[in-house]
Structures are given as C-alpha cells and as structure tokens.
Amino acid sequence: MLNKADNFFLLAGPCAIEGEDMAMKIAERIVSITQKLNIPYTFKGSFKKANRSRVDSFTGIGDEKALKILQKVGQTFGIPTVTDIHQVSDAAMAAEYVDILQIPAFLVRQTDLVVAAAETGKVVNLKKGQFMSPESMQFAVQKVFDSGNKKALITDRGTMFGYQDLVVDFRGIPTMRQFAPVVMDVTHSLQQPNQTTGVTGGRPDMIETIARAAIVNNADGLFIETHFDPANAKSDGANMLHLDLLEGLLTRLVAIRKTINEF
C-alpha cells in the first residue's frame, strides 16, 4: 500500500465495528469496487471508540470481539486492515490482528503512544491534530522513525475553524509529503464538532468537493468512512458517505487522478 503508484490508495470502512455481518458486507462491497478501479484498498474500522462527547455514546462491542472481526475481514478478502489505538496497551494487542495502527488526531502528540505503535513494526498512520500545523507533523513522523520504524503515514482531517467547524488547508498536502505519504481524511474533515446536543454533526454533501481537491493536489491516499445506513450508524453517521455513493465517487476520482498524472 505504501509503494508509489499511479493511482491513489484508499482506507475505507465504517467508523466503528458494530458487528461481523455489517463489517463483512461493507468490506465485500468496497473490495469489489476497488478491484474494478485498480485502487489499493485497506479496510478501516475502529475496534473501540474512546473519544466520545457523551458517556452514553456507543464505544464498541468488545475489544477482542471487534479485533477478531477485523482480522477475519483481512483474511477473507486478502486485504490490509487499520484500526485506531488510544492507549499504550492497545498497541501490542491490536497489532496481533491488524496491519496498520492509527493514532487519533487528539492523541498524535502523545509520545508514549506513538512510540508503542512504532515498536510493533506495523505501519503507523498519524492523524494530524486539528490544533496542529502541517509543518509540526514532521516531529510525529520522526518519533516513529526514531523508534526504528520507517513505515509512517500522515492523515489530514482538517483544522479547527472556530468551535463548531473544520477547514482543510490544501497547502498542507505538499508540506507533509516531505515527511511521509499523505492521506486526506475526507469524511472527518467535514465534521461539525461541539454541537449543543453532544453529538457531532457533519457536511456529507461536501465529501466530493474535498476528495476532488485532495486528488488534484496529489494526496497519496484517501480515507473515507462509509456505511450502508449512515442515519442509523452507531458512530459518526452525520459525516459518513452512503455506501451506494462510493463507486460513483471513486470512479470520478480515478479519472481525475489519471488526468493529473499526465501533467
């Protein structure tokens, strides 16, 4: 997935693992689409959600149960898998089941967590903090490198713009590509945090706008959360892409990348 290719790669799946049937159903659909379009694909799913706004929000179905589902997805379809970790003890545990360990944006400055992920030898996906500049991500990448691991990704998921919105500064893509391959997290970049309900909102109508701009500006990969029923998803449904819309979106993005490659 980290090898340079003419096409972008894709990290996609549901926000959280809600059960085996839903994970397999989503993975099967995306595998079919990405094989058709020759897009290198990694299945994404959180085995638990630790950064919730409210204590009554969905956090997961059980750590080991969810991780075993991620492992089954990878083995069934022959694809890599990625999940996020939140504490040092998660790193070694999750590394037994998945191929990429993701550091959440809120935690990317936590040295012990980044080092623990790096020391597993897995690819480490570092999500840029909403409060951080693109330039500052070089130090997060260096922590991975200094731990003896040269397999790092940087994922941009927008920057805070006031209390209830995020913006994407596309100047960050070429800046961060100096440090590691760069992924654009299209769906989280469209979150609207800090709502009075305690449930994060979103702008899924802008998904294609952000994705197109990322591809034009040479993002190496895209990160897209998708679900066959976003309205009833247990986490982040407000900014997810409906699974039925994914093939059309990716088809258009592949065409854009093919054009960009000619320049």
Image: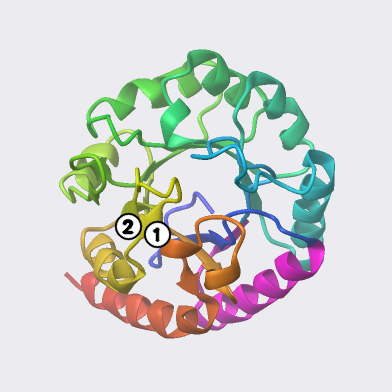
Would you name the residue on which mark 1 appears? 187
The crowd level at tag 2 (other Cα within 10 Å; few <14, some 14-19, many 20+) is: many
Q: Is residue 211 visible?
A: yes
Question: Going by the image, does 76 lie left or right of 125?
Answer: right
Q: Quadrant of the C terminus?
A: bottom left
| Helix, strand or loop at mark 1 | loop
Viewer-nearest residue: 55 or 126: 55
Q: Quadrant of the N terminus?
A: bottom right
Would you name the residue on which mark 2 appears? 190
Q: Are circles 2 and 1 on residues that touch, CB within 8 Å?
A: yes
The structure's colour scheme is: rainbow
The residue positioned 56% from the left and 55% from the top of the image is: 235
The crowd level at tag 1 (other Cα within 10 Å; few <14, some 14-19, many 20+) is: many
| Helix, strand or loop at mark 2 | helix
Viewer-nearest residue: 153 or 61: 61
The residue positioned 68% from the left and 27% from the top of the image is: 91
Tell me where residue 227 sits by quadrant. Answer: bottom right
Tell me where residue 156 sits by quadrant. Answer: top left
Which residues lie in the magenta part? 20-43
The residue positioned 26% from the left and 46% from the top of the image is: 164
Q: What residue type is labelled 2?
A: Leu
Which residue is situated farthest in the front direction here?
196
Residue 32 on image: x %, y %: 63, 80
Q: Which amino acid does label 1 sit on?
A: Thr
